[in-house]
Image: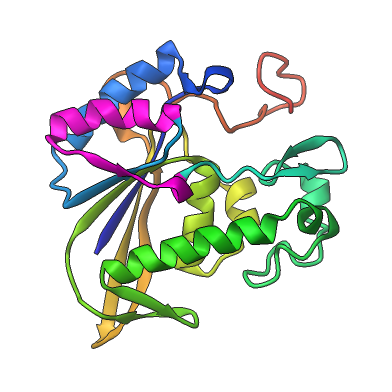
Amino acid sequence: MRLLIVRHGDPDYENDALTSQGRLEAEALSERMKNIKADECYVSPLGRAKETAETSLKKMNMKAEELEWLREFAPKVNRPQKLGVAWDWLPQDWTNMPYAFDFDRWTQYPALEEAGVQKERDWVYAEFSAFLERHGYKKEGKIFKVLEPNSDTIVLFCHFGLECILLSYLLNLSPFVLWHSTIAAPTSVTTVVTEERREGIAQFRMLAFGDTSHLYAAGIEPAFSGRFRERYTNDWERLD
């Protein structure tokens, strides 16, 4: 099985929509996606993801099922600096959390516990687990039991924070590492596939993360959304 996780285009968060840049990105994405022979497509209920998916789905001649658990992963946490989403911490703060790098225990931090992050994570994990089981793969411990081997291509139109939660489940990694050490730019495509080296047993392997080749093919520079300034003195780039 092949999973394509697609982040929405450059966001206008205030209106839960795409910016003009985001609409250009979504059009470039659609030129890539029209060549994907997908078996099923799913989309977040949030406007910026649905708007991104719309152009691609039209060219793919497909419809997407809306799934509530594909919404952005955004419990509000009282971080040391200010109230904010679970996945935006200063490096000197998150790297000093006792379990930040631990797949099983990363939610065990007072501010995260207070914000109900584990409850949200467990809900997403449970929904994703049931989803994967319907598609032929059941997680048992750190590997997957193959219920029905297949080569289906499944497309998920969603969000960067949530994407890292899904990848953490598939790859047995703490999402803190993914949230802060990687970036999937707007309309980027992450590809994850099953590997079955022994009959009945599978793991997931990431073939590509945050691929934006469709943007460069269209002459579009990837948007900065989700990133922070490269140098502290770059005051035209985002600080917080």
The colour scheme is rainbow
Q: Is residue 4 left or right of residue 63?
A: right
Between 92 and 158, the one nearer to me in the picture: 158
- Residue drawn at point x = 60 percent, y = 59 percent: 121
Between 36 and 218, the one nearer to me in the picture: 36
Residue 7: quarter of image:
top left
Between 74 and 175, the one nearer to me in the picture: 74
- Residue drawn at point x = 77 percent, y = 44 percent: 77
Residue 76 at x, y percent in the picture: 72, 41
- Residue drawn at point x = 31 percent, y = 34 percent: 213
Q: Is residue 220 visible?
A: no
Question: Was residue 185 drawn as part of the magenta stretch in this picture?
Answer: no
The quadrant in which the N terminus is found is bottom left
Q: Is residue 189 left or right of residue 101?
A: left
Q: Is residue 234 above or below residue 92?
A: above
Residue 119 at x, y percent in the picture: 65, 60
Residue 167 at x, y percent in the picture: 47, 58
Q: Is residue 184 left or right of residue 30?
A: right
The quadrant in which the C terminus is found is top right
Q: Is residue 204 left or right of residue 177?
A: left
In the rendered structure, which segment of residues is drawn in magenta? 47-70
Task: Name the residue furthest bottom.
Answer: 199
Q: Is residue 214 above or below residue 114?
A: above
Q: Is residue 235 visible?
A: yes
Q: Is residue 77 above or below residue 238?
A: below
Question: Was residue 62 drawn as part of the magenta stretch in this picture?
Answer: yes
Q: Main secondary structure of the magenta part?
A: helix
- Residue drawn at point x = 36 percent, y = 17 percent: 23
Between 126 and 202, the one nearer to me in the picture: 126
